[in-house]
Amino acid sequence: MLRERRLVLAGALVTLASALASCSATNDASKNAEMAPRVEANQNAVGQPIQMLQPTPTPAETKPLTSSPPRPEELNEAVTRVFQKAAITDTTRNPNFVIGDFNGDGSEDLAVVTKPGENSLVAINSVFANWTLDDLSKISIPGSRPATQMNPPVPVRAEKAETLLAIIHGVGPKGWRNPEAKQTFLLKNGVGSDMTSEPARTLLNSKDKRALPPLQGDAIREKLHGKPGMLFWTGAKYAWYSPPSE
């Protein structure tokens, strides 16, 4: 009887030891599985080359568009967009317009000869107008002696039938043709003869650089009162410069 109990006890111990060994093996396998590197579903299969991500190419710098010469109806449309009926295109001048990047922002601008519209002097001289009315004869070149003198500003007024040069700054690739292009400088004493546009790069690459004002964009070449010179953007206004040698 005692021997049978011993055999039963020994069998139970063997069974317990076997169960403990099985649990230990299961735990070790689980730990090893956790420590092993995981293979994601999107990894390449063994033996296939790994493709590297290529950087997105940087878009090329946008260059100003070379537009066609404006048609008469386009000139009228641009002037009407800015002035409505306050000013109209002056068709008695030839040429009566030039185009170029006059303020140096990379967008094409339009300089066009205008005159006040019929019964529109009040509107064109209004202090609430969307354009800036300046007298070119009263604007000094930055850094010159007259520019350092502190004179009180004198109100500028356009007169009936007076010719005025309107410079419409362009917006974006469409330039002055853009419907949003409305920033305009209206200049008294700015309409001369032989009006042409000269690119800033041509002027800056010329051999005689001493006869140049501080350019920020293309210049408008013309003769005012028989004296040749150029109209240029100062960064805030348009000014007139005539080289002493000319």
Image: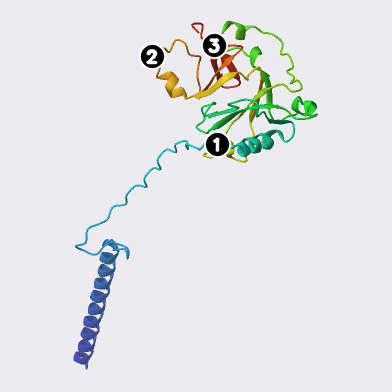
Give the spatial CA distance, label 3 vs label 2.
Answer: 17 Å
Q: Look at label 1 and name its amino acid.
A: Gly
- Give the SS element for disc 3: loop
**Number of residues whose C-alpha sits closer than 10 Å to that of mark 1, classed few (under 14), some (14–19) or many (20 or more):** many
Coloring basis for residues: rainbow
**Number of residues whose C-alpha sits closer than 10 Å to that of mark 2, classed few (under 14), some (14–19) or many (20 or more):** few
Residue 175: give its label. 1
In the image, residue 220 lies at what x, y percent?
Answer: 54, 22
For the point 44% across and 19% down, the residue is 203
Q: Quadrant of the N terminus?
A: bottom left
In the image, residue 130 lies at what x, y percent?
Answer: 70, 31
Find disc 2 in the rendering and name its residue. 207
Looking at the image, is 25 positioned above or below residue 94? below
Find disc 3 in the rendering and name its residue. 242
Looking at the image, is 51 positioned above or below residue 105? below
Q: Look at label 2 and name its amino acid.
A: Lys
Of marks 3 and 2, which one's residue comes earlier in the chain?
A: 2
Looking at the image, is 87 positioned above or below residue 143? below
